[in-house]
Image: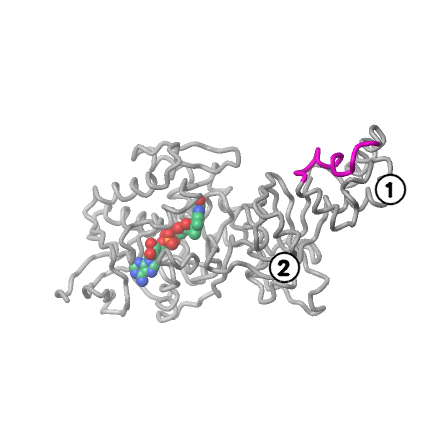
Amino acid sequence: MSDDLHFEVLVAGAGAAGLLAAIRAAERGRRTLLVEKNTKAGVKILMSGGTRCNLTQNTDARGIIAAYGDQGRFLHSALARLDPMGVVKLFHAEGVLTKVEETNKIFPVSDSAVDVRDALVRRLERTTAELALGEPVQNIERHQAGFVVMTPRRRVLCDRLILTVGGKSYPGCGTRGDGYAWAEQFGHTLIPPRPALVPLVTHESWVHALSGLTLPDVGVATVVSSRAPPDLQIPPHVLRSVRGRKKNSPLSADRGSLLFTHRGLSGPVVLNVSRAISGHALPSAFDIELDLLPDLKLDALDAELQQAAAADGKRTVANLAARYLPRRLIEALLERLQIPPEMKSAEFGKSPRRALAEAIKQTRIPIAGTLGFAKAEVTAGGVSLDEVDSHTMQSKLVPNLYFAGELLDLDGPIGGYNFQAAFATGWLAGESV
Ligand SMILES: Cc1cc2nc3c(=O)[nH]c(=O)nc-3n(C[C@H](O)[C@H](O)[C@H](O)COP(=O)(O)OP(=O)(O)OC[C@H]3O[C@@H](n4cnc5c(N)ncnc54)[C@H](O)[C@@H]3O)c2cc1C
């Protein structure tokens, strides 16, 4: 082991937040060391957005704050320094042009997450910061006004320490929750980490049989199941926004693309509502309610089906309904309702017609659980925001200790919100040290 080294700033974890923190600190003239466990920087950037990296959302600071619900307030100062436009400009300056997709997600024009990661590493390399790869931080202790940080290779002294080691989802990426123990060691409160943006599991075999089917626009709501115990409690942390919520309204609801899988449900809309289920101790107390045709009211759909059936009595019911939704799905719904798919429209009376319309508008799927941290795109929970100064990202408990990124109790929806928060909080931490 080499002799002690001294840096003004040590940043632990070279993900989105850590790269920005180190860049900013070094550009401000701080002697900075960025230490990363993996042999590459930004591993999660590389795998993000299906390797295309949805780097932010086409909105302003207010749009980001609103999407974070009750956590949004914490992001005001960070976004004042680096908002979505700021992120876009930062990448443009590195030659990474961006495009806005229909969903308002912003991607590099090249559709290459490598370009995003490389841009950040390039900018870091133009500073005096040192990047140490394949060097996990193993232990941290207070040392006078600063810290001593242990890695397998060395002991490093630093005046200020920025922790950006992420959460504990996708542990294969190096994110195994290492930062939580250090935060607790320094007296910080941990909001229990839990998977978010995670696929849901159901035991319903008809759902598994539809594996691979994608629907572009589905309304999805998380509701309390009739199987739930009568005294079921809903802890506020599972809800994105507690204020103004009515007692029996869905715990979470969204509209967008849905994917049937061999274990259950996935796709952006499901990931977005998963937080309410993954955060609860009893995931099986919930159902997912699907509205497969969100633009059509139940009565209007019923009336349309009636008209179509009357217009051509020889058509089969499956054919009739297949103009709305994929045939595989229609056949699965008809089978559940015990309506033969080859039934002629002329025989398709009021009661089966209404039953089909209701199945399309409000099918309930009992949920058994989630795919857990292994497949959660982000970790909800983490270092309590109450104990971190949102103007600087500095700990309110330990001077010269800073937090940024997913290690904090911050988790946003799908759409570039999570990188935006990581970039902005990392930047602010680098600006403050
Ligand atoms: C499959 C997938 C796809 C995603 N797609 C998107 C997307 O398109 N858009 C979006 O906005 N968000 C996306 N996310 C979420 C986004 O990746 C995270 O929110 C973001 O990376 C958080 O940034 P961070 O810097 O806080 O943490 P991370 O990016 O997780 O970085 C933490 C870093 O710390 C390192 N580390 C951990 N422990 C130690 C240690 N002891 N010593 C040293 N280093 C350590 C880790 O190896 C890691 O490199 C996706 C996530 C996943 C898993």
Q: Residue under circle 2? A: 203
**Horizontal relation, residue 89 to residue 207: left or right:** left
Q: Quadrant of the C terminus?
A: bottom left
Please report the bounds of the magenta region as a residue range.
Answer: 314-327
- The residue lying toward the viewer, choosing from 356 and 385, is 356
Q: Residue under circle 1? A: 350
Extreme-front residue of the structure:
342
The amino acid marked with disc number 1 is: Lys
Residue displayed at 41% across by 59% down: 167
Mark 1: give few (<14), some (14-19) or many (20+) Cα within 10 Å.
Answer: few
Is the shortest distance between ligand 1 and the CB of mark 2 under 8 Å? Answer: no
**Horizontal relation, residue 207 to residue 278: left or right:** right
Q: Earlier in the sequence, mark 1 or mark 2?
A: 2
Picture coordinates of residue 365 (x, y %)?
A: 67, 54
Residue 156 vertical position relative to residue 323 in the rendered view, above or below: below
Q: Is residue 268 magenta?
A: no
Mark 2: give few (<14), some (14-19) or many (20+) Cα within 10 Å.
Answer: some
- The residue lying toward the viewer, choosing from 35 and 217, is 217
